[in-house]
Each structure stands twice: as C-alpha cells, then as structure tokens.
Image: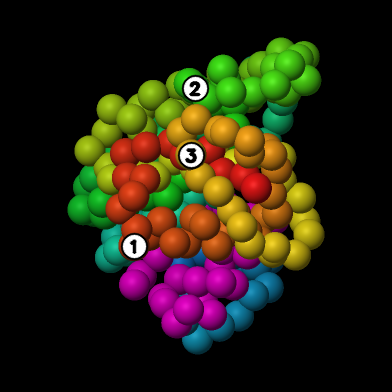
C-alpha cells in the first residue's frame, strides 16, 4: 500500500512513518522543509507541502492508495489553517481518486464535546477555543466530502511506550481519556484496511 503521511515531522507523525515502513509499505512523508527531514529508507519518499498550498497537496496525493493525516495546529490564536487545510486536502484527494483518509482530530471536537468532563470543557473554553473552532470547521468540510474517512478523536496524548488495550467508541463508557502516541499510531494505521469506523469519528482511549 502506498500511503501519504501528512504531519510526518510531528510526535505522532514520526510514529506513523516508522510503523508504516516497518510494515513494508511505500510511504511519502509530506513536510514543509524536506532538506531537514533526517529519516532515510528505501521505501520512503519525502515531499514538500504546505497546508495552504493546494498544488503541493495534489502532487503528493497523486498515485497514493490512502492518506494518514496527523496535521496539527500551530497556534492557539484565531486562525483558519485547519479549515483551509481540509478544504485543500479533500480537493486534492478527490482529484487524485484517493478514497481513504485516516484523520487525526481530538476528543472534544464536534459532537464529542458533550462527552468531555468539566475540566476538559473549562480548558477548551479558556485555552483551546480558537483551535477547536477551526478544527470543527475543517471537520464539517470533511463530513460533507466523498472521502471514506475515519476521523480519529483521541484523548490526552503522552509520549510513553505502547501499552495496548486501546478502546474505540462513539459514546465513551468508562473510558479514560488518554493514551500514548504510539498506541494512537497503531490504531490509525489499522484504519487503513478496517471499515468499522468509515464515515465515523470514534473516540479512542484506554
């Protein structure tokens, strides 16, 4: 499988690239500055791309079987980067005929807000209000698209080693809203070939 990884230099994106390569696939890592990307592998291609640059996303999507996006926000200030990114990504994937997208979202986005505890809601309101507003606009575009997406909404992420036991649900029942990025990467990669959560936004945690 040929997979494009967007956000390849991030903490989650790094796990995604390494794990996909270990599975024997052909991986394209989309980064802003290819010359600074240090990972080398015979099945890895590094491509330059920008969230606001539709043509760069079109070039990167061409010939791919699927896309995994771990693209994250760059500021807590008011912005439209995630909205513009999703608009461009949907357009690029549609033009290239790439159907499957595994997209990294967050617990608290969209209709999952009601499943957040009081502390999370307070933190969203005081710190992440602009970020989530932008993310929600991007998700609205994704949900209206023809893409076969899996919109993954993890809880708080940590950098510890994988521990397994990841749970996924639309309505969390006894789930603890956190997990490691390595477990997140494993779950996201599994969604490339698993149709259970297509066109859905599962909450994932332990």
Q: Which mark is residue 138?
A: none
Q: Which residue is mark 2?
A: 110
Q: Between residues 42 and 154, which one lies in front from this camera angle?
A: 154
Mark 2–mark 3 Cα distance, whole angstroms, equals 15 Å
Counting other residues with Cα less than 10 Å from the Cα at mark 2, is it few (<14), some (14-19), or many (20 or more)?
some
Find residue 130 and report its horizontal and vertical position in percent: 64, 18
- Which residue occupies 42% across, 77% down? 25
In this view, 51 is above or below 158: above
- Which residue occupies 50% across, 86% down? 42
Disc 3, SS: strand
Q: Earlier in the sequence, mark 3 or mark 1?
A: 3
Q: Are marks 1 and 2 in contact (CB under 8 Å)?
A: no
Counting other residues with Cα less than 10 Å from the Cα at mark 1, is it few (<14), some (14-19), or many (20 or more)?
few
Range of magenta residues: 1-27
Q: Earlier in the sequence, mark 1 or mark 2?
A: 2
Find residue 70 and report its horizontal and vertical position in percent: 55, 49
Disc 2, SS: helix
Tell which residue pokes out farthest to the bottom in this image.
42
Find residue 58 and report its horizontal and vertical position in percent: 33, 51
Please say whether residue 157 is one of the residues in the magenta stretch.
Answer: no
In this view, 169 is above or below 129: below
- Which picture quadrant has residue 192? bottom left
Q: Which mark is residue 169?
A: 3
Find residue 158 and report its horizontal and vertical position in percent: 76, 50
Q: Which residue is mark 1?
A: 193
């Amino acid at each position: 499988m040929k997979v494009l990884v967007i956000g390849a230099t991030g903490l989650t994106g790094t796990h995604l690239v390494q794990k996909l390569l270990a599975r024997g696939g052909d991986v394209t890592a989309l980064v802003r500055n290819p010359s600074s990307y240090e990972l080398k592998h015979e099945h890895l291609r590094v491509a330059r791309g920008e969230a606001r640059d539709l043509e760069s996303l079109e070039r990167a999507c061409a010939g791919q079987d699927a896309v995994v996006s771990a693209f994250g926000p760059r500021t807590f200030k008011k912005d439209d980067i995630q909205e513009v990114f999703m608009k461009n990504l949907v357009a690029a994937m549609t033009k290239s005929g790439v159907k499957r997208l595994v997209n990294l979202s967050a617990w608290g986005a969209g209709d999952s807000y009601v499943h957040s505890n009081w502390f999370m809601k307070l933190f969203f309101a005081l710190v992440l209000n602009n970020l989530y507003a932008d993310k929600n606009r991007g998700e609205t575009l994704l949900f209206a698209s023809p893409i076969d997406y899996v919109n993954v909404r993890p809880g708080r992420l940590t950098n510890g080693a994988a521990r397994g036991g990841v749970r996924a649900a639309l309505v969390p029942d006894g789930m603890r809203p956190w997990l490691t990025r390595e477990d997140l990467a494993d779950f996201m990669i599994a969604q490339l070939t698993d149709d259970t959560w297509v066109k859905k936004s599962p909450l994932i945690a332990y």
